Amino acid sequence: MVTWGLGLASGGDSMVVAMTKEHKDGDGGVDIEPKYRMKPLIYFVAYTIPMLKMFTMFNFLFDARPLNSHLLSNLAPSTTTVDAALWPEPVARVQHLLDSGIQEIPKCYIKKPSERPSFIESATSDLNIPVIDLQYLFSDDDSLRQTTTNLVASACREWGFFHVVNHGISQQLMAATQKVWREFFHLPLEEKQKYANSPITYEGYGSRLGAEKGVSLDWSDYFFLHFLPISLRDEKKWPQIPVSCRELVEKYSEEVVKLGGKLMKIFSRNLGLKENYLEEAFGGEGNIGACLRVNYYPKCPQPGLTLGISPHSDPGGMTLLFPDEKVSGLQVRHKNNWITVKPLPNAFIVNLGDQLQVLSNANYRSVEHRVIVNAEKERVSLAYFYNPRGDIPIKPAEELITEDNPPLYPCMTFNEYRLYIRTRGPCGKAQVESLKSSH
Ligand code: OGA
Ligand code: NI
């Protein structure tokens, strides 16, 4: 099958953005058919039609608001070299704002009163997301195995968020990887700036989500990198210092991706699909998208006025979060309350993203979450995003469609889908909901 899509390909130290005609079963490289390497007129036609198609689609996604002009100019059909100067405003590193000794946070971080966190203890304060022990997942005892998969099924339906313990990933590896990232954020600014990111790929050291001028900013810095598909992995873009960083990221990523694959099988079966359904829909083993965002939340002198990350649902498939065990901050929206997740030692927090909502035709739903900050302690979290490969069309599984349950979402690739959050910043569940209502 052949699809038109937005191809993002890595070209040496710079990123290359091109509209390409790709084969679904391709190897991940951007593969332009020979007949499209051709004369200007045909070239013009071949690129203009999909561009028009894409803009029409974005207009409906963006409520007819034009895309940020910076981003648009970089989505042009020609090949464009990108550097870090593409953000619409100068980028401030939150950590270094704090180090400069400010007592009041700049205006751009101040949320509207209705969006600010409440620190008043609520009646829901002892509620926590479910904790699932995965040790029996591969037990020979059918009933123990079934109990575990049932627990996952109800956690997916009721919460969309759960802790997993006894997941098989070494505690030492988890602790060492988190430590090395904390050290990275404590390096001098000049060292980190070598990896400063741009809104085109987001890879590297960043401090904002959303490429539009004037978007509300959150109280955090981050580092974003690709592990899979291999065609997007570029270890040169990962920190060279601390020296063990690249090796640890590689080992940690392998383990987390394996755990993600196991969970995908359980989700598939629980939805009544073939065990490999979701994995294959995501591009197949080794070909899925897996990327890491390490979040760094500095202390905040006025934590009641801002957020570490504004409310959002994760745009991809599923997220495996290794939070700071000593500092809480993640809040999950549950029945219209914000529940503060109490961290557990050596556990991962798993949550469903928008692509699983689409594939399951809303049998499963992604859940809105946000992060609050505090004046006493910095917080580091590792969010692993387990996503479909960017150029594969994603749509509700045929097996889940009946006359009474028509498809709720249109077909779209993840590269197209995630431009929304990358342009506008976190917007609750606005994107996935808008797809549904407009279909
Ligand atoms: C994210 C996220 C939560 C956290 O990175 O998408 O929701 O606790 N992180 O850092
Ligand atoms: Ni998130």
Image (tube, rainbow, N blue to C red):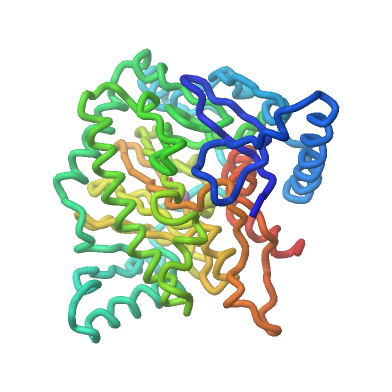
Q: In which quarter of the image is residue 90?
A: top right
Residue 59 on image: x %, y %: 79, 45
Q: Is residue 216 visible?
A: no
- Which residue appears farthest toward the left when viewing the image? 172
* Relative depth, front residue between 327 and 23: 23
Task: Pick the quarter of the image with the C terminus.
Answer: bottom right
409 left or right of 229?
A: right
Residue 302 on image: x %, y %: 43, 36
Q: Residue at x 44, y 24 (%)?
A: 93
Q: Residue at x 61, y 21 (%)?
A: 86
- Which residue appears farthest toward the front when viewing the image? 34
* Relative depth, front residue between 378 and 178: 178
Q: Is residue 169 visible?
A: yes
Residue 25 on image: x %, y %: 54, 51
Q: In this view, does 84 lie above or below 224?
A: above
Q: Residue at x 81, y 24 (%)?
A: 40
Task: Pick the quarter of the image with the N terminus.
Answer: bottom right
Q: In this view, does 182 lie above or below 26?
A: above
